[in-house]
Image (cartoon, helix red, strand yellow):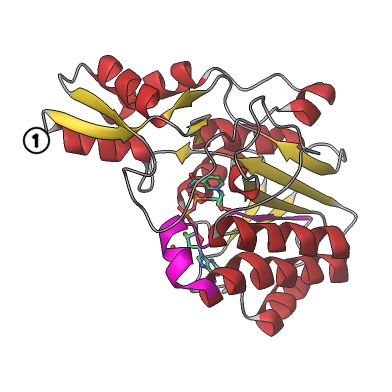
Amino acid sequence: MKILITGSNGMLGHDLQDVLSKKHELILTTSKTLDITDKEHVIDFICDKKPDLVINSAAYTDVDGCEENQDLAYSINGDGVRNLALACKEIDCPLVHVSTDYVFDGSARDPIAEDGEIGPISVYGKSKLKGEEAILEILDKYFIVRTAWLYGINGKNFPKTMLELAKNHPEITVVYDEVGTPTYTPDLACGISQLIETDYYGIYHLTNSGSCSWCEFARYIFEVAGCDVKVIPVTASEFARPAPRPSYSVLDNRNWVDNGFEPLRDYKEAIKEYIELIK
Ligand SMILES: NC(=O)c1ccc[n+]([C@@H]2O[C@H](COP(=O)([O-])OP(=O)(O)OC[C@H]3O[C@@H](n4cnc5c(N)ncnc54)[C@H](OP(=O)(O)O)[C@@H]3O)[C@@H](O)[C@H]2O)c1
């Protein structure tokens, strides 16, 4: 297949390239070569390249930054996605769009299925929801893949920050009242590569298996990496940040499993591999 990837310089974008280049012809775009907020360019570019599939891994992902730069957040995460959907409609090509657990409000106490009640509490979550809504309005052939707590080799992420802090902090405070599923971007990219071989269009939750709080995750990272660091649990309200986060956003990967795919491996296995790789 000829696949156009947006945001190919991003953390997930890099792993999508790695995984998909083995089997497919890729058209890689960045914010410089294809700014998804430029409607005319997006439509011209995609109509000219005529890909068989578009994967959108471009987004404004700075959750706190979105609170300050609301227009930018809605422009990239909402209108940008709408532009891609319009272009895909024009050439009748499916769109894979990566979305987030932050479209939920955190009030659930059990893993949330794809049809769980939506209710974003941050500008980031609200802007990502706008993107989802535009796709549902415009396209029939789409995969909306909601994922969570991403980390990978290429990009800023929680495990990297923890390991960096551990170099010169004997004690680190970490939030314990937010629970989710850390997800390794190469595992997600492999999942997406399986999904695109099908026409099982729809909304998918796709994360590694298992769940933990940020605090438990930090402790596990330090245990695996052999770092002697004391993790001090704090509440999200003690650890003030501009954007509120859902206190619980574990995603039930129900559609994925119901469509016959193997669940992604446990987050503990994945983080072990990551730490081994970056050591
Ligand atoms: N990170 C997480 O924990 C997390 C959790 C759940 C869901 N997600 C979703 O997963 C996807 C991938 O996330 P990620 O962490 O890999 O993101 P990332 O590393 O921040 O990469 C996002 C990419 O988007 C590009 N971009 C920004 N504005 C753009 C524009 N106007 N036009 C075109 N490209 C633009 C950036 O390109 P340049 O580098 O060229 O500027 C950047 O490389 C996103 O949809 C995100 O919402 C992420």
Residue 279 is situated, as x and y percent measured from the top left of the image, at: 24, 26
What's the residue at 69%, 65% (across, down)?
Answer: 81
Q: Which residue is mark 1?
A: 168
Front in this rendered view, residue 11 or 25: 11
Front in this rendered view, residue 72 or 237: 237
Residue 88 is situated, as x and y percent measured from the top left of the image, at: 80, 65
Q: Secondary structure at mark 1?
A: loop
Amino acid on which disc 1 is placed: Asn
What's the residue at 46%, 22% (across, down)?
Answer: 270
Q: Is residue 278 left or right of residue 99?
A: left
Q: Which residues are magenta?
A: 53-70
Q: Is residue 245 left or right of residue 107?
A: left
Asked if the magenta segment contains residue 60, the reply would be yes
Asked if residue 99 is positioned above or below residue 207 in the image, the reply reads: below
Asked if residue 119 is positioned above or below residue 249 in the image, the reply reads: below
Residue at the limit of the structure toward the bottom, as seen here: 40
Q: Residue 132 lies in what quarter of the image? A: bottom right
Q: Residue 249 lies in what quarter of the image? A: top right
Asked if residue 275 is positioned above or below residue 82 in the image, the reply reads: above
Is residue 227 at all visible to an observer of this figure?
yes
What's the residue at 70%, 27% (across, down)?
Answer: 252
Front in this rendered view, residue 221 or 237: 237
Q: Is residue 93 left or right of residue 270?
A: right
